[in-house]
Image: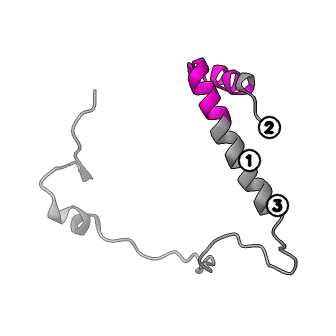
Amino acid sequence: MITKEEVEHVGWLARIEIDAKESDAYAEKLNSVLDYFGQLDEVDTEGVKPTYHVADIVNVFRKDEVTESMPQEDVLANTEHKQEGNFKAPKIM
């Protein structure tokens, strides 16, 4: 059970100003969340495989092979903003 004082302490740690009315409301809301987790703890999950992701996604790896790059002239062919063989970008500072 989360108390009003604990809510105020967490607010202090997070540098959030919480008044007395808000701390009562937050304590009530947080306790309802904890009650819900208590209900989830009661669910029988015997024989259920853990799910780490909703979609069955696996990493796809490919061989890391060195290949030829595009020629510099082809890379810069579609820009007007080039200087000394590089893309020219605006100054930041």
Q: Quadrant of the image for the C terminus?
A: top left
Crowd tier of the residue under label 3, counting other residues whose Cα lies within 10 Å: few below 14, some 14–19, many 20 or above: few
Crowd tier of the residue under label 1, counting other residues whose Cα lies within 10 Å: few below 14, some 14–19, many 20 or above: some
**Secondary structure state at the residue bearing disc 2:** loop
**Secondary structure state at the residue bearing disc 3:** helix
x and y percentages locating residue 57 in the rendered image: 60, 78
Say the numbered circle drawn on residue 41. 3
At horizontal 25% and vertical 65% (from top left) the residue drawn is 75
**Secondary structure state at the residue bearing disc 1:** helix
Q: Nearer the viewer, mark 3 or mark 2?
A: 2
For residue 15, say whether it is visible: no
At horizontal 77% and vertical 59% (from top left) the residue drawn is 39
Q: Is residue 5 left or right of residue 85?
A: right
Q: Which residue is identified by label 1?
A: 34
- Confirm or deny contact between disc 2 and disc 1 (CB under 8 A): yes
x and y percentages locating residue 34 in the rendered image: 74, 47
Q: Quadrant of the image for the N terminus?
A: top right
Amino acid type, label 2: Met
At horizontal 84% and vertical 64% (from top left) the residue drawn is 42
Q: Which residue is identified by label 2?
A: 1
Q: Give the magenta part as a residue range.
A: 6-27
Give the spatial CA distance, label 3 vs label 2: 16 Å
